[in-house]
Amino acid sequence: MPRTRSKPLILVALLLAAFAVNLDTTLVNVALPTLIRELGATDRQLQWVVDAYNLVFAALLLTSGSLSDRFGRKGMLVGGLVVFGASSLVGGFATSPGELIVARAVMGLGAAMTFPATLSLLTNVFTSRRERTLSIGLWGATSGVAIALGPIVGGFLLRHFSWSSVFYLLGPVAVAVVALVAAFVPPSRDRSSKHLDFPGLLLSAGFMGLLVYTIIEAPSHGWKSIPSIAGFTGSAVLLAAFVMSERRAAQPMLDVRLFRNMRFSAASAAVTIGFFTLFGFIFLITQFFQFVRGYSPLSTGVHLLPVALSVAIGSVVGTNLAVRVGTKAIVTAGLALQAIFYFWVAADLSPTLDYSIIATQMVVYGLGMGLTTAPATESIMGAVATDQAGVGSAVNDSTRLLGGTLGVAVIGSVYASLYNSRLGATLPAALPGALTNTAHQSVGAALEISHQLAAQGQHATADAVRLAAVHAFNHGFSIGSLVAAGVAVAGALLAAVFLPNQPPQRAEPRERSAQPIETP
């Protein structure tokens, strides 16, 4: 065990590693419009600049977490940071969208190696209840702040430098974090593990990869299309095969009987729902700020700061309150605050809504997010024995990524469907067909058409297109918010019924057997 005086430096190193991975989640999105001009990227290629990273990240999380338990968490973290930083640096030198997509996929591998190791090392270093609660609260706060700061950092870089700077940035950051980890973080691994669970490694990667790929593609193909149904069916088959394989394995990579423990499974569901609402929120609010309010990418990031700060506060306060009041109460309250936020947005949304009201709404949401995810994460990690911290952390991270992917796909699909139906009914009939089709692509495209028409002197038509686009966007945003609110309400009810009130005590290293079933 590391000396007490070194623990603050260990904490800083691990939090910075988590910060770098989470920063990239939203950092690259800001550069997407620039890639159209600089690299000639199509909309489909832009999608895969984002999704190649998410797909590889999701597919290899459980595998990386299990391998870190077996071979060493510190080594996996250092290797992941090297892969992550080097591939980001290489991505900055890309001369075509294809090269950048490949670099992003390799970054996903680095992120999958890095992120589970940060949380598993934290819980192995900070073993007392008080220390673990504080460190996980700070870990959750760091993650939330990084996601919110991505647009600010990206917007600043794009204002002063080229798009490549967005990718160059993470190279030296990774080098600095590797130096800190190498100097201060102690080695940690599961010494009882003797064999690798190859079927589990392969089936988990196949299940997560196919599921996330299907969710990503479902809005394009249609949720009821043959490719989507085949993808979800294949994912279910792989999941069933994974469960059967793990139950039969002498040394499984993941003891699936852990899901009988509501402190593990109900908390995992709460994290999934929290990130469903978070990424749905980011998807909608960034379009609202940039297109409807006309903010620049940098200004959009600055206007999102209330979320970043309140998530940080909610994460630290939430984990401490969960110890005193109980995990059930705090997580339920957090999900309820998220629902209140979305109901409030659906009722008040307006292009001219005062920013002070929007900021207040975001504070409510950020506090709800922090109160939900950080205490739920502490519950997950407290239910997993120390020797399985890597794969336990990977489960937590997988629920985050799966929830975020679902949030963008589901809320994005609801928004897009309602936007297109309302726009089709309100666009001027005299608008040429080609412009009408372009306006249906996005609210940004519709508002660009309005600007072009105004520049040509067609002010009446331009105003009509702008009003139609804004009203259609507001309609889609409002109903999408109601969907997110409904999901948050369902999550609050789930937590209130199934999540045990008190977080468990740290489990000690043990043989690979299930934790006792605990009732709410």
Image (cartoon, rainbow, N blue to C red):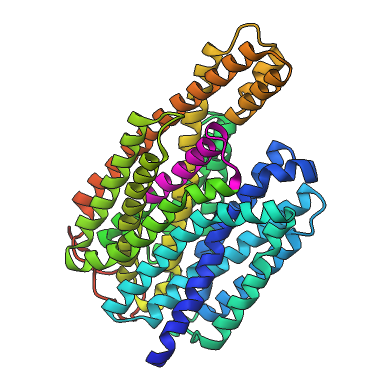
Residue 292 in the image, given as x and y percentages of width and height: 53, 31
User: Does the rendering let one see residue 248?
Assistant: no
Foreground of the two, 484 or 145: 145
- Residues 81 and 380: in front is 81
Where is the C terminus found, in terms of image quarters?
bottom left
Q: Main secondary structure of the magenta part?
A: helix
Identify which residue, 505 or 126, lies in the foreground.
126
Residue occupying the point 35% across, 79% down: 511
Q: Residue furthest right?
A: 95
Residue 217, above or below 25:
above
Q: Is residue 288 magenta?
A: yes
Direction bottom: furthest residue: 3
The answer to whether residue 58 is visible is yes
Q: Residue at x 53, y 18 (%)?
A: 468
386 shown above or below 226: below
Q: Residue furthest top?
A: 430
Picture coordinates of residue 404, whole percent (x, y): 47, 48
* Residue span colored magenta: 273-297
Q: Quadrant of the N terminus?
A: bottom left
Q: Specify the quadrant of the image occupied by residue 465.
A: top right
Q: Residue at x 52, y 75 (%)?
A: 68
**Which picture quadrant has residue 93?**
bottom right
Give the total number of marks visible in the rendering: 0
Tell me where residue 6 appears, x and y as whole percent.
44, 89
The stretch drawn in magenta includes residue 290: yes
Q: Where is residue 214 drawn, in percent x and y?
A: 55, 41
